Image: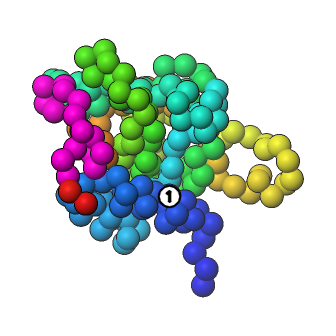
Amino acid sequence: MDEPAYTDLHWGMFVPAIKGQGTDEQQNEWLSLAYKMKIIGCYAQTELGHGSNVQGLETMATFDRQTDGFVIHSPTLTSSKWWPGGLGKVSTHAVVYARLITDGGDHGVHRFIVQLRNLEDHTPLPGITVGDIGMKFGNGAYNTMDNIVLIFEHLCIPGNQMLMWVSQVTREAKYKQSDVPR
């Protein structure tokens, strides 16, 4: 039996992002859940105002010293994530692309693992708004896709949910290149 179409992004983008950008510790934590489909992931990069122009992305992940975590926020309508496949009904988590902010400094776009839904009843978590994007342009085949709009409203996530193979943020809010060997 073929896997449902929503798993294409889970296996093709979510899992590889963790494998390629996560530390060994992060891979051990997240991949075991993903392989067993205890969490189902999608990929949240594209924004309404910027498409896939990663340099123009506006979603922010601001480091919070008090919690040693990040606050994910969509500051404008154009920063809403657009087209995350599989998120409308199925995905529980996402690899989210956001601008990393520490003490006012912008360190460019980084990747974060973000839980989007309650695993018990599948409702969006507080601070997350999801909605249907409606009819899609082009041929009718795209209208069968489970694509939505995703907005973050000051969502707090733990600091270890930043994929840290390339870089990390210390408890003192210092940005540094990772020394994780590959």
Q: Residue furthest top?
A: 104
Q: Is residue 71 above or below residue 87?
A: above
Crowding near the residue tagged with mark 1, few <14, some 14–19, many ≥20 C-alpha atoms within 10 Å: some
Percent position of residue 156, x then y: 30, 32
Report helix, strand or loop for mark 1. Answer: helix
**Which span of residues is magenta-colored?**
164-180
Task: Verify whether residue 179 appears in magenta.
Answer: yes
Q: Residue at x 54, y 35 (%)?
A: 54
Q: Is residue 149 visible?
A: no
Q: Residue at x 63, y 44 (%)?
A: 83
Q: Is residue 176 above or below residue 94?
A: above
The quarter holding residue 150 reads: top right
- Our reading of the magenta stretch's main secondary structure is loop
Q: Quadrant of the C terminus?
A: bottom left
Percent position of residue 66, x then y: 15, 23
Q: Is residue 143 left or right of residue 147?
A: right
Q: Is residue 165 left or right of residue 116?
A: left
Q: Which residue is mark 1?
A: 13
Q: How many marks?
A: 1
Q: Quadrant of the N terminus?
A: bottom right
Percent position of residue 155, x then y: 36, 31
